[in-house]
Amino acid sequence: MTDTQDIPALMADLGARARAASATLAFATSAQKQAALEAAAEAILAGKDSILAANARDLDYGREKGLGPAMMDRLMLDEARIRAMAEGLRAVAAQEDPVGRILAEWDRPSGLHIQRVATPLGVIGVIYESRPNVTADAGALCLKAGNAVILRGGSESFHSSRAIHACLVAGLKAADLPEDAIQLIPTRDRAAVREMLTMTDTIDVIVPRGGKGLVGLVQREARVPVFAHLEGIVHVYVDRAADAEKARAVVLNAKTRRPGICGAAECLLLHRDIAEGLGRELREALTEAGVALREGEEAWGREFLDMIMAVRVVDDLDQAIAHIRRYGSGHTDAIITEDMAARDHFFERLDSAILMHNASTQFADGGEFGMGAEIGIATGKLHARGPVGAAQLTSFKYLVEGEGTIRD
Amino acid sequence: MTDTQDIPALMADLGARARAASATLAFATSAQKQAALEAAAEAILAGKDSILAANARDLDYGREKGLGPAMMDRLMLDEARIRAMAEGLRAVAAQEDPVGRILAEWDRPSGLHIQRVATPLGVIGVIYESRPNVTADAGALCLKAGNAVILRGGSESFHSSRAIHACLVAGLKAADLPEDAIQLIPTRDRAAVREMLTMTDTIDVIVPRGGKGLVGLVQREARVPVFAHLEGIVHVYVDRAADAEKARAVVLNAKTRRPGICGAAECLLLHRDIAEGLGRELREALTEAGVALREGEEAWGREFLDMIMAVRVVDDLDQAIAHIRRYGSGHTDAIITEDMAARDHFFERLDSAILMHNASTQFADGGEFGMGAEIGIATGKLHARGPVGAAQLTSFKYLVEGEGTIRD
């Protein structure tokens, strides 16, 4: 065993193993990857008791540490959650293999035939907080896309993550894939996170999953590229030409279905012309549903993740757009209108990763987009954007076919 | 005018202007961008004399500095090169607009219709060396993709770049686009380059064009993402099942057509079984063409960019692949064979940006790939890879259409 006190050496070793494993994974067959994920699902169901025992240790630790009820709930595993984890692995197993897809192909006057083919990215680093199931979800998605992954779970879920990780490794072994394809950092030492962020030779992309503190740290300090979003400051703009029924349904759902997810609406923008009529109705409906409405500038640009919502009356569509450009986070923003020109203007002038028309922002999710599982949602502009599924965890190469073809 | 002595303030100002211009450019029409590029081509032809006068000052400076003949040639403009620059602008003008393309669209059981639409990346920084025509090429490609660009030319081509830049700005004005869409750093101070590399708030991507010194510096120091390749250590592997005629044509062309470009072959790998017969023939033909052959380990993994080529005899296909994995640079590598299983194995086990079969590596070029002009070739795995044309200078967003659709 590596001495876990020497973090740089430990991480360099993990990185080198991951890189070596990724070279083999790059040409693993679809059947092998599928078999590994199915075997891992089996191992999780069969290993239920030891996972629950490990989780009990984490829960004790969490109680000692004085974690709040929401954190304790995230940390907690029960039979239903373990079954859901296994089902998640099977769902990823059943997805189409994103590697080897021909993304484009064409012929050239020179006689060359060119193909652009999807390849794995290489090595992904995933840094997450207390939810132990991320170990399974993230490990599975990275493997599906032919990538090696280095997982760094939250210190609270240390034992649960180790128990789940052991099941993933059992799956890899069963399918004759390298065990180093999915590694879990075997220490709670936070220095390991900072080390990961600089491992540009062995990690291709880092995906942080968690709160603003974690994501902000990663975005600030990482030398390795990052797929992430810092905040979901999601707006719903109700235009003067909104259909009242659609507005009611969408606004309520966007805010209250699950107020704690990143696609939950945080700010309602009302066109001046409907502020008194439909606007008043919407305020009343929100209040009745238990949402505390906040007026005034100090509520703009805030991610409440709670039953709280900012409300602002704007003069027109352009002021709504200007508000979203200034206070939004480029995650998801929606317009409610029957005026197609207003929709087009909203879609054109804003550059959020996801723009919606007459639809709830709670749909901002890889599963709802039809991508299968997602490893997160990205608001950066390079490579991955919006929900990041297995296909977004691939790169590509060009395969060029000639017949002794030479260039003039 | 900004005080050019205060480099951080100067660069912050340029960055803020570029960001503001990019917001307008994002919804510039195709016709406007085309008109700007055509007007810039006109301005370059009309401004020929002042460009030549500016270039004469640069050539004087280059002579004083004692630049070698190759560098002086790169720096030099004449009427033919000016005409070629104008034609290059017109060719980019005539290309299809990469912005607004629907990259994918699909329906969901929820009733949502989802589109993935190409958008500009934002602001590109281009850092180049002595070729003044890069000012026009890079400026045009960035504009075509709706991006603002900050250009940093080599100090030797300072006056030529300024004169060419003035023509690009004339084009922007003629098409009623913001002048800040194409900015040239108005100082030779090298501190401006280091400043650019850290401007993560205002620059989305940096493209360095030049030698290994420049690209290496940018890759090491940049906090902003980089599209680049450090070296083109290009291999041609002649398999035991190679067709002799194809091998002769491709090997000669790959090395000698233009030995100084990044797609030029640098190392010839010969399967042991053909090392004496076809291998000897290839060596003789290369030597006759003026290529100095180098055997032995010290020649492996080197980018000669000259009439020099490493030669190695390998035991089999897997040793060739292992050699390329170890000594290659992930740019372009080729196999010459009639054995399709060998080709498939080579294509599968290597992950260079471009892999070729029975074709000259000199085709590694955006123009030859049918992408129109290219801003460079990238070997990174994120976002852009291989030749980087206007389409690779775009990002995307999701446009989601509902009918009051809410999530269960």
Image (cartoon, coloured by chain):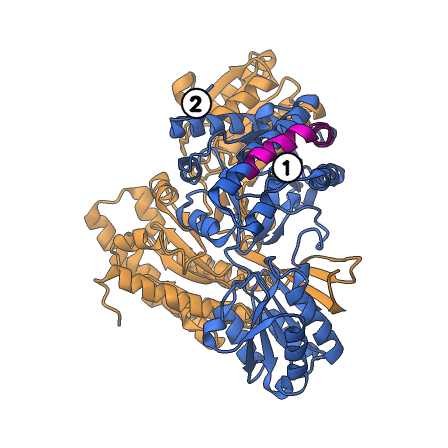
Chain colours: A blue, B orange
For image coordinates 42% across by 45% down, the residue present is A222
Residue A133 position within the rendered picture, expressed as x and y whole percent measured from the top left:
63, 40
Instruction: Please name whichever residue, B338 or B3, is drawn nearer the observer in this view of the structure.
Output: B3
Which stretch is magenta?
Answer: A37-59
- In which quarter of the view is residue A43 placed? top right
Instruction: Please name whichever residue, B16 or A387, is drawn nearer the observer in this view of the structure.
Output: A387
Q: Main secondary structure of the magenta part?
A: helix
> Would residue B383 appear left or right of B226 to someone viewing this image?
right
Tag shown at residue B103 = none
Dots 1, 2 in contact, CB < 8 A = no
- Residue, disc 1: A136
Amino acid carrying mark 1 in the image: Ala
- Residue A163 drawn above or below residue B369: above
Is residue B359 in sight in this rendering? no
- In which quarter of the view is residue A91 placed? top right
Instruction: Using a 10 Å C-alpha cutoff, classify the residue at mark 2 as few (fewer than 14 neighbours), some (14 to 19) or many (20 or more).
Output: many
Name the chain under label 2.
Answer: B
Q: Quadrant of the C terminus of chain A?
A: top right
Q: Provide the secondary structure element on which disc 2 rests.
A: loop
- Residue, disc 2: B300
- Residue B389 drawn above or below residue B296: below
Q: Provide the secondary structure element on which disc 1 rests.
A: helix
> Would residue A108 appear left or right of A207 to someone viewing this image?
right
> Would residue B294 appear left or right of A230 to someone viewing this image?
left
Amino acid carrying mark 2 in the image: Trp
Name the chain under label 1.
Answer: A
> Is residue A56 covered in magenta?
yes
> Is residue A96 covered in magenta?
no
**Farthest residue, direction left:** B64
Is residue A38 in sight in this rendering? yes
Residue A395 position within the rendered picture, expressed as x and y whole percent measured from the top left:
59, 42
